[in-house]
């Protein structure tokens, strides 16, 4: 997968994914992490839902968005 659009701000000392970066989903303790394939740095994470809850959150497409600030993180297969 690769990042199509990432308009989230860049912060010093915090990993950031740029357009065109290859990424992959990796499981963690109670979380799913989106990591850059080049160095394994986590650029996004979300808590896993309880096992009895159907998780319908997207794994591709727009996976994170703050509409009032205009921030979007979008990935494609």
Image (cartoon, rainbow, N blue to C red):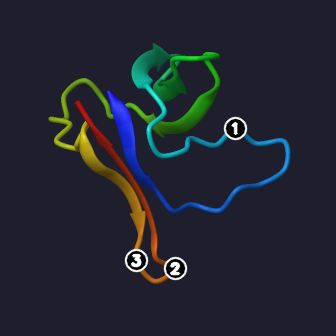
What residue is at 49 percent from the left and 27 percent from the top? 33
For residue 69, which numbered disc appears in the image?
2
Q: Which label's residue is closer to the chain start, 1 or 3?
A: 1
For residue 67, which numbered disc appears in the image?
3
Instruction: Using the numbered discs, state the Cα–Cα distance from disc 1 to disc 2 in whole angstroms.
Output: 20 Å
Q: Which quadrant would residue 48 be assigned to in this image?
A: top left
Rate crowding at label 2 as few (under 14), some (14 to 19) or many (20 or more) other CA atoms within 10 Å: few
What residue is at 56 percent from the left and 60 percent from the top? 8
In the foreground, 36 or 49: 36
Badge 3 marks a residue whose secondary structure is loop
Badge 2 marks a residue whose secondary structure is loop
Instruction: Using the numbered discs, state the Cα–Cα distance from disc 3 to disc 2 in whole angstroms.
Output: 5 Å
Q: Are marks 3 and 2 in contact (CB under 8 Å)?
A: yes
Q: Which label's residue is closer to the chain start, 1 or 2?
A: 1
24 lies above or below 43: above
The residue under label 1 is: 15
In the foreground, 32 or 17: 17
Q: Which of the image's four quarters has the C terminus?
A: top left
């Amino acid at each position: 997968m690769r990042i199509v659009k990432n308009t989230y701000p860049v912060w010093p000392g915090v990993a950031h994914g740029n357009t065109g970066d290859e990424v992959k989903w990796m499981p963690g303790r109670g979380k799913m992490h989106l990591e850059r394939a080049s160095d394994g740095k986590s650029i996004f994470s979300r808590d896993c839902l309880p096992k009895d809850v159907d998780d319908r959150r997207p794994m591709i497409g727009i996976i994170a968005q703050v509409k009032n600030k205009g921030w979007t993180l979008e990935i494609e297969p």
